[in-house]
Image (tube, rainbow, N blue to C red):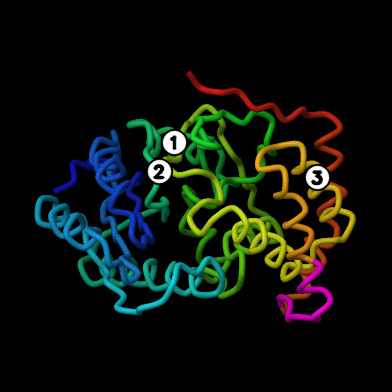
Amino acid sequence: MNGNIDLSKNYLLITPCKNEGNHLPDLIESIVSQIIRPIIWIIIDDGSDDNTPQITKEAANKYNWIKILRLDESRKRDLGLHLANVMSKGFNYAIEYCNKNGIKYKYLGNVDGDLTLEHTFFSNLIDEFEKDPALGIASGGINFTINNEVVYVKGLSIDEPSGGHMLIRRKCFEDCAGIPQSYAYDAVLKAKARLGGWTNKRFEDNLAIEARDVNSAEGYFKGFLHLGKSHYYLNFHPIHIFASGMLKIFRKPYYGGIIYIIGYLFSLLKREGQIEDDLIKDYYWNKWKRVYKDRLTTKVTYEVVK
């Protein structure tokens, strides 16, 4: 048993990971120590070739609510369509397990393999859901690691949950037809939720801590390039792209904004495919108007955590 008593607070959790042996022990410890543990936690090993399989096997042997889904695909880390497929497989596996075993749940969550969470993290989010019946997707705030310094970023939009540690109301998840099979699946999911009448919120004081440098899983260059290409796929307006790129050049690594713009322009000039959902395309084409209205009233600051 995982210690849950109130069935109305049950949530299932998934974690996609590849070669996260350096970070998984801390994540596992932080999930085990949650005031409200997940009713089931699926760790999706996407073909790791480090000690990730050993770590996950030991955790599953120790806790019967931790299950391992091993994907034996030998491929490099892929944050595009492959990640959406991995997330979908993880949630489907968890949902099927719950259905077969008569396990009830009200929320679905995901957490990245390089995070650690405060022990009240999911309890706090569930409290917010109980206060607001219209809340569809929520996350906490995050202490980023940037250039080997832990940095707390203040002033990010409160209606933009972090894709790396979300909790989703089951009804919202079902209304959105599950995980979209697209680039930037989390951005598309949040847009679908909003368009469906749900609200999304980021609760900054409820902290997750990122162990790995931002965008460094495959290197900063690839990270910013991928972000630019993803934003083209979602149909972001060029005004948004160039304004965001210019803002990024004032933060380390200073070349990030330029690479981000290049990624967008590369996809634009090649006329690569974009998301086919017209509502989502229109949503992101006009997003710059909302974003920069918020930026005029909210200052984003970066504080080094000592």
65 left or right of 210 in image: left
Q: Name the image quarter holding residue 222.
A: bottom right
Give the residue at mark 1: 209
> In 3D space, how far apart are the residues under numbered discs 3 and 2 (Cα atoms)?
27 Å
Going by the numbered disc 1, the residue's amino acid type is Ile
Eyeballing the image, is 111 above or below 177? above
For the residues labelled 3 and 1, say whether their Cβ atoms are less than 8 Å apart: no
Give the residue at mark 3: 291
Going by the numbered disc 2, the residue's amino acid type is Leu
Q: Secondary structure at mark 3?
A: helix
- Residue 204 on the magenta segment: no
For the residues labelled 1 and 2, say whether their Cβ atoms are less than 8 Å apart: yes
Q: Which residues are magenta?
A: 265-275
Which of pointers 3 and 2 lies earlier in the amino acid sequence? Answer: 2
Which of pointers 3 and 1 lies earlier in the amino acid sequence? Answer: 1
Q: Position of residue 3 (x, y in %)?
A: 18, 41
Q: Position of residue 293 (x, y in %)?
A: 86, 39
Give the residue at mark 2: 115
